[in-house]
Amino acid sequence: MVRKYLFSSDHKVVGLQYALASLLFLLVGFGLILIIRWQLAYPGIPLPLVGGWFGEANAPGGIVLPEFYNQLSGMHGTIMVFLAVVPLAVGAFGNYLVPLQIGAPDMAFPRLNRASFQLYLLGGIIMLVSFAAPGGAAGSGWTSYPPLAVLATEGQTLWLAGMFFVIVSAMLGSVNMITTIVQLRAPGLTWFRLPFFVWSQLVTAFLLLLAFPPLQAAAVLQGMDRLAGTGFFMPTGLVVGGEVLARSGGGSPLLWQHLFWFLAHPEVYVLILPPLGIVAEVLANNARKPLWGYRLMVYAILVLGFLSLIVWAHHMYLTGMSAVLSGFFQATTLIISIPSVIVLSSLVLSLHGGSIRFTTPMLFALAFLPMFGIGGLTGLPLGLASTDIPLHDTNYVVGHFHYVVAPGTMFALFAGIYHWYPRVTGRLLDDWLGRVHFAGSLVCMNVIFWPMLVQGLAGVNRRLYDGGLQYALAQDVLGLNVPMWLGAVGLGLFQLPFIVNVFGSPWFGRVAGRNPWDATTLEWSAAPATVEGAAFQGPQVFRPAYEYSVPGAPHDFLPQDAPGEAR
C-alpha cells in the first residue's frame, strides 16, 4: 500500500504528495523565522531551548553568529517561495483540482506528473542537506547574488543543485498543466465556462514555463563560476582578502540580477494567481452569486501574466540604469497594477447583494482581500525610482512582500484547504477549530508585518543580524522587534488547531455529502474520494461555472453538468 501511494501517477495522489511535502517545508521555513525573530528581538542572548542544537560553529553558547543568521534568512526565503508556497498553490491544488474541474480522468502525462513531484522533493532535500555541509547552508540570500554567492561556502553549490531540480520539476509540471487544460476539457466546457481557478492555473503554468529557463541557465553558469573558475558573473580586478582574485574574462554581477529577476518577478504572480483563483471559487460559492465581471477577470489575468514578464528591473533601480530604461520599468510597473485592481475589485463587487455564508473558508477568503490590498498598496512606492531608492533594502520591502505572501497568499491557501477538504477526505473540518485558527492567525500576522513597514520607513535596513542595534536611526523602532517575536510565537501556536483539525478530522470530522457546499463546479460532481475504485465517467457541461441564485431554478444553484437548458 505504501509503495502504491509513493509511486502512484494518479493526479489526486500526486496532489496530496505535493500538499504534504510543501506543508512540511512550510513548517521548516517557519521554524527558521522563529530563530531569526528571536535574534532580532534579543541580539546577543542565547536561544532558549534549542540554542545548543546548532553547534559552536553556528551558535556558540546558543548565541546566533552573523554568518549563521545569513544562512537562516537566505534559506527561509528560498524554502518559503520555492519549496512551500508555490508547490502548495500549483503542485497540490493544481494537480488535485484542475483535472476534476475540467472533467478529465487525470493529467495529460501522469508519469511526467509523478516525475515532477519526485524532482521537486529531491531538490528540496538537497537544499536542506546543505545545512550539514562544511561552512553551513547557502548564506547569500534567496537571490544568490554574485560575487558573494560565487565565493560562498559549499552550501551554495548545494543550493544551486537543489534549484536545478526544482526548476526542472516546475517546467515539467507546467507543460503537463497546459496540455491538460487545452486538450482534456469535458464536452461542452468551452473556454469561458472554465472555473476561474483553472484560468489562474493556466496563466501560472505559462509564466513558469517562460520565466524559469533563464534562471536555470543562470544557475548552471553560476555553478561553473564556483566549480570551474569561469567568470560569467565575476568581474575582473575583484579584491578578496587583500589580493586580486584571478578570474578569466570580465563577468557581470548585474547579468545575474537580470536573469534572476526575469524569473523572480513573474514568480510573485505565480504566488498570487492560484490564490486569487481559490478566493474566487470560495467567494462565489459562499456569496451565492456568480462572479462579477468573470470575463473581465479572465482578460485581466491574461494581461497580468504578459506584463509580469516586462517589469523585472524595478528591483534594480539602484544599479545605475539609464533614465530612459528606468522610465520604461516605472511605467510598466504602474500599468501592471491595473489588472490586479480589476481582479480585486471584481471579487469585492461579487459580494454586493449576496446571501453571504460566513463559513471558515469564507472568513479566510474575506480576510485575503484587505491583506492582499495592503500588500499591493505598499508596493506602489517601490515601483517608482524616486521612492524606491530610500526604501530599497529596508524592512519596508520585507513587510510589503510578506503582506502579499503571508496574510495574502497563505490566507487564500487556507481557504482552499478548508473548502476542498471534504472533497479529499469525505469529512468536514471542525468549524470551531477553524475559526480559532483564523482569528489568531489574522491578529498575529499583522503584529509581525505591520511593524516592518514602520521600521523600513525609519530607514532600518534588512539583513542586519542585530536588527540595527548599532545604528542611531534604528533606536526608536528597535523595541518593535519584541512584539514581532511574540507575534511569531503566537502565529506558531495558532497553527496547532489547524494541524489537529487536518490530521484528526478524518476520524472525528462530520461526514460530508458529495456536495456539502452546494457548489456548481465539476469537482463536486465526480465520484468522492471515499469510493474506492469508482470508474471515471466523463461529464457533459451545459452551463458556465457559477450559476448561483438562478431565477426559477429548483435550488439556488445549478451544477455545470446538470441537464437542462444550456447557457
Image (cartoon, rainbow, N blue to C red):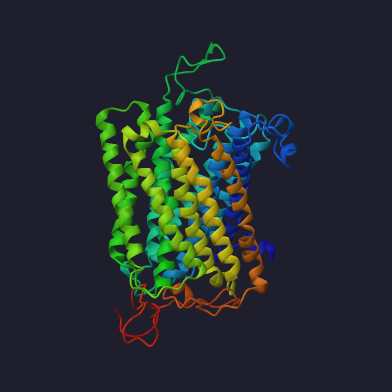
The tally of labels here is: 0
Q: Quadrant of the C terminus?
A: bottom left
Confirm whether residue 173 shows in the render. Answer: no
Q: Quadrant of residue 555?
A: bottom left
Q: Residue drawn at (34%, 35%), measured in percent from left and top?
A: 387
Residue 369 vertical placement versus 530 (above, below): above
- The answer to whether 421 appears left or right of 134 in the picture is left
Q: Quadrant of the N terminus?
A: bottom right
- The answer to whether 52 appears left or right of 325 in the picture is right
Q: Nearer the viewer, residue 186 or 93?
A: 93
Q: Residue drawn at (58%, 48%), measured in percent from left and top?
A: 487
Q: Tell me residue 444's x, y (percent).
A: 55, 52
Q: Quadrant of residue 152?
A: top right
Q: Tell me residue 333's x, y (percent).
A: 31, 43
- The answer to whether 346 appears left or right of 80 in the picture is left
Q: Find the residue positioned furthest to the front.
A: 476
Q: Tell me residue 105's x, y (percent).
A: 48, 70
Q: Tell me residue 373's x, y (percent).
A: 39, 53
Residue 565 vertical placement versus 64 (above, below): below
